[in-house]
Amino acid sequence: MGGDRKRFKLSPQSKGYSEPDSSHNLLSALRDSQTSVSERRQLVHTLRDVLSSKLLPPLLETQPKPSNLRRSDKCFACAWVSDTHVVVGTKCNKLVCVDAVTLQMHDIILPPKPVRSEELLMASNNHPGCGIHTMAVSPDGSLLAVGGADPLDCQIMHIQQQHGKAPTFTPMQALVGHRDWLFGVTWLTDRHIVTGSRDHSIKLWRSDEDNGTANYRPLESRTDHRTKVRDVKYCRDILKLASLGADGTVKLWDPNLSPVQSMKLAHDKELVCMAMTANLVAVGSQSHVSLLDPRIAQPTIRALDSIDPGQGVRSLGIMDNILSSGSGRGRIAFFDLRANDYVSVQPEALSRPQSPVARHAATSYTPAYTPAYTPTWYDDDDDDIAFVYDDEVQEEDEKATGTSGAKAADGFSAS
């Protein structure tokens, strides 16, 4: 990037890019003299179906539908969108809003896939759905960035709070440009966002359209990672972005995606999650949590043993001096960074009284994929944390084996 370029200023990114061809739509095909009679007849039937409300209502429906996460596949991501509501994303590409008080749930309707160029359409067809692996709420709490109807896209949704009711979600814009699954998303400002993908790239975007149009041009794109990008996190206090690569590296960037430094991890198997604060980056691997200080040029990387060695650290979260982690076996642990020890937990603290509690971890025997603290933890003595479990896997295993209880960790399927 040039030194005279202003921060976040949109610059041409047209290399290898062509706008989607919108000339060959349904009406233009009907007018085309080269369209055969049988093809015209089929197009007329398609248009009639749309106008007779066979296809249109699902696209326009905005009323929430009741939902049940037990009928969904793995829950990969979650985020608090209000003091009482959590949004959850699943492997089967469902987006669900959960009332943490009443436990009522309703589906959030994702808009259809946006129009794509031939190159991006080919990439989409080569990588069928893998679910929603990531989501993040903007600093002002008004926008939700989440995996889209196409797992390669990032969908921006406007969050409308309603007193005494569940929030509503209105599609604003789809960020289209990745050529493989979206694995990470983080907000830099209330309008600037960074995405990380299995296509080895991280991209910087500006989202300020609210008319449902797609954005095909990132402000910047980097492919410094040699393999898939598993997560991205940004800390506004130190103005640094961290990206986690499956190649065993953590890379730090400034807000314009200019590289700052790169660090190689000693424990680099099954890297799937990361958490970040002003003085700490935590990375989960197969049997460890690696800790490093992003403020130091060549930090010493410290490793904590996982509570379930070999089972994989599937999720991480940091609040004050407490580091929370969820394992592939479903055990949730809290590590006190000041006391340098795991903290004993009580079953009622995790709202799963039916689960046995070990000295340092609560166990659900299903992978705990994603944690999210309430947005108002800083002025509430009772900190709430939501963990999402893969109950569907447990139920299917119990049906197959006729048993219940502990089982081997479910592998991270979207790798």
Image (spheres, rainbow, N blue to C red):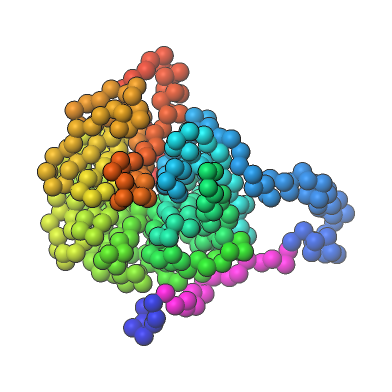
- The residue positioned 52% from the left and 61% from the top of the image is 175
Position of 399 compared to 230: left or right?
Answer: right
- The residue positioned 27% from the left and 64% from the top of the image is 237
Residue 37 seen by the camera? yes
Query: Bounds of the magenta span?
Result: 8-24
Residue 244 coordinates in the image, percent (x, y): 31, 55
Between 5 and 21, the one lying in front of the other is 5
Residue 189 coordinates in the image, percent (x, y): 40, 66
Between 137 and 19, the one lying in front of the other is 137
Q: Residue furthest bottom?
A: 4
Q: Quadrant of residue 228?
A: bottom left
Between 97 and 18, the one lying in front of the other is 97
- The residue positioned 52% from the left and 43% from the top of the image is 164
Residue 401 coordinates in the image, percent (x, y): 41, 16
Q: Is residue 26 magenta?
A: no
Position of 234 compared to 81: left or right?
Answer: left
Query: Chief secondary structure of the magenta span?
Result: loop
